[in-house]
Amino acid sequence: MKKKTKQALSIGMMAILTIGLVSGCGSGKKEKVAEEKKEDKKKIVVWGPIPEENGPQDVCDHFMEEHPDIEVEYVRYVNDDQGNVKLDTALMSGEQIDVYFTQFEDYYVKRIEAGMAEALDPLLEKDGFDIQEAYGDGVWQYEGKTYGLPTNYDHQFVWINEKMFQEAGIEIPTSWTWDEYAEITKKLTKDADGVKIYGGFMKWQDVGRLMGRGQVLGADSFYKSDTESNFDDPVYQQTLELFDRMMLQDGSHMNFVEATNSKLEPYGEFLSGKVATCISAPWITRYINDQEKYPHDFKTVAAPLPITEGSEHNYGWPGLTGVIMMNPATAQKEAAYDFIKYYGTEGQKYMCRAGKIPSWTGIDPEVALNEMLGENAEELFDVDSFKNVIFDEKIERYYNTKFNKLPELERIWKEEVERFVTGEQDQESTLANAKERGDQELK
């Protein structure tokens, strides 16, 4: 009996050892497969200007659900001069950035010319992707090549504090000239308990590319010819006169330089009741909807941009922007392209709540607007005014075709205007300096 028991124990121990070995082999195999799958998974790093919680992370998450073999890491950079320098420095240093966003044409051109952007045309052609069908006119190109897809349709207009207009007895305009705008914002400027309330607020990056030159001259407004700048066109003088009137004489607008140095944002000044109007794009709806962080007791009304009286044209904002681009140094070109295409098309629906109007024609713009204005739209916004302004089919659009020295010309105009609005130089010197410097760049 004891002999049988010992034999049984011996067999049992052998069985346990065998099971352990088999189990160990199975576990090792599973770990190896998991490791191989991990190695097969591609990772791309995306740099963008919008806080991830305001839509980009949703886009990334839905993309990863549809592409389980691709991991996406989103890195936010601030869309100001300092933030763009940070992005450019990271691109040049070789840090992993596979995909990134560019908001303005001067940065777009600069990055292409510096070899930091991949032409997407071969990938688009291989994929059968029709740019015209997807977005219509106005997709940014450089020397006939496409370096990115637009992820939203930008639209600048005037945001109005309805309560302040009512208290001042001013009717909210459905159309107005810059002279009328200047006069109204002057009337709205006042002191309240020792605090100055400005009639209007503008940031350079929002209006410096539009007021006067863009609105009247339209495309390629910096160029008289391929070798001569256009800074002696009367429209530049008219623009300086308007700035002088609003910022220096009437004091109805905070100085550009003061606002920039103080790092003030239009939505912050507007929602805190420090300005009666501001000029900006739809993205500030996300701050208006954030009643917890930006409590306010007034309804916001949309008014169209003022027009330049007597001008043959009054162009609106160019439109397509938020261009998503590929770093040519990426080791994951196919994965990067898949993400660019997704964000540039169906992924845009997750950005509406961030105040981004889709550029892709596959999304109903009215549905997007309803999503953008949010659940409390009737309480916070004059909804009809937003529909009328954003869907105004009468707005003419312009699309630049010349890019030679564009970043330099943008910088020259900005620097000379800053010297003017700070009182460092007079109007005549400002225009003469801009013209001389612009011509030197182009020649």
Image (cartoon, grey):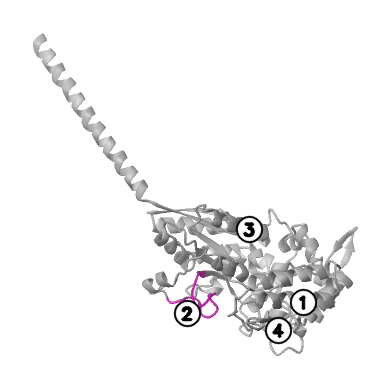
**Secondary structure of the residue carrying numbered label 4:** helix
The main secondary structure of the magenta stretch is loop
Magenta region includes residue 138: yes
- Please state the horizontal and vertical placement of residue 85, each as a whole percent of the image: 63, 58
Image disc number at residue 290 = none
In the displayed structure, 272 sits above or below 417; it is above
Q: Indicate the secondary structure of the residue bearing disc 1.
A: loop
Query: Which stretch appears magenta?
Result: 130-149
Identify which residue, 364 or 145, lies in the foreground: 145
Q: Gap between marks 2 and 4, in whole Å? A: 26 Å
Residue 215 image-quadrant placement: bottom right
Give the alpha-carbon distance from disc 2 to disc 1, as whole Å.
37 Å
Percent of width and height locating residue 268: 73, 59
Residue 172: give its label. 1
Amino acid type shown at disc 3: Val
N-terminal of the pair, mark 1 or mark 4, is 1
- Determine which residue is flagged by label 3: 85
Check the image and report above or below for 41 versus 30.
Answer: below
For marks 1 and 4, give the CA distance. Answer: 24 Å
**Residue position for label 4:** 216
Distance (Cα) linking label 2 and label 3: 32 Å
| Left or right of 345 on screen, residue 166 | right
Contact (Cβ within 8 Å) of mark 2 with mark 4: no
Q: CA distance from mark 3 to mark 1?
A: 40 Å
Label annotation for residue 132: 2
Q: Earlier in the sequence, mark 2 or mark 3?
A: 3
